Image (tube, rainbow, N blue to C red):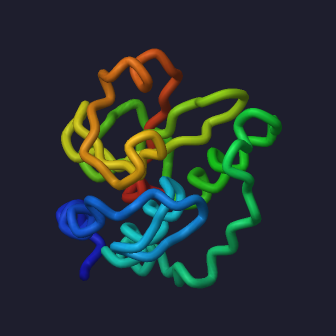
Amino acid sequence: MHGTREDVLTELQDWLGTPYHHAARVKGAGVDCLMLLLEVYGRAGVFARMGVDVASIEIPHYPRDIMLHRNEEMYLEGVRRYALETDRPDTGNIALWKFGRIYSHAAIITGWPAIIHAHAPEKMVVIGNATQVVLAQRPVRFFDPWGTR
């Protein structure tokens, strides 16, 4: 793939229905919201456009309930390494929400407010809507992996 927004959306569709599984990253078997980002942008060629091998990205251990017990913005800082913050929720960009103490849930925007994310309550990768109460009432930030560095 060439790393375009269209490539991301095509790859993302293939993950729909993948069961939610904390810290997993296997299409059709299990994934969480962080690993969904890594796998989709990696397989779509976005990281390759940046000169980054997705296999070289080290993800430190993170407990399922990290947002309840930690103040370090690990997820936010990780996203900032590979995408520029923007005020525009463009297609293919990342939406990152604050749950608990930290920014700890992400989705890929398919046409705001439409998103696709690995959603623990629904137990799988689903098409979602950012206007749903569980998301709409939380702080959200947007990141563009194609932004100029």
Residue 18 image point, x, y percent: 34, 64
Looking at the picture, how far across and down is residue 29, in whole percent? 41, 73
Assign the N terminus to one quadrant of the image: bottom left
- Left or right of residue 10, residue 149 in this image: right
Question: What residue do we see at 44% from left, 76% from top?
Answer: 26
Tally the marks: 0
- Image quarter of residue 124: bottom left
| 98 and 44: which is toward the camera | 98
Q: Quadrant of residue 48?
A: bottom left
Quarter of the image holding residue 130? top left
Q: Can you say whether 15 is above or below 88 in the image?
A: below
In the depicted structure, whether residue 106 falls above or below residue 20: above
Give how far across and how far down residue 81 sits, in percent: 61, 58
Is 65 above or below relative to 132? below
- Is residue 67 or residue 52 the one in the foreground? 67
Choose between 7 and 114: the one closer to the eye: 114
Residue 7: % across, % down = 22, 69
Describe residue 54's horizontal placement relative to residue 75 as left or right. Answer: left
Q: Residue at x 42, y 26 (%)?
A: 135
Q: Residue at x 48, y 67 (%)?
A: 38
Residue 95 in the figure: left or right of residue 109 = right
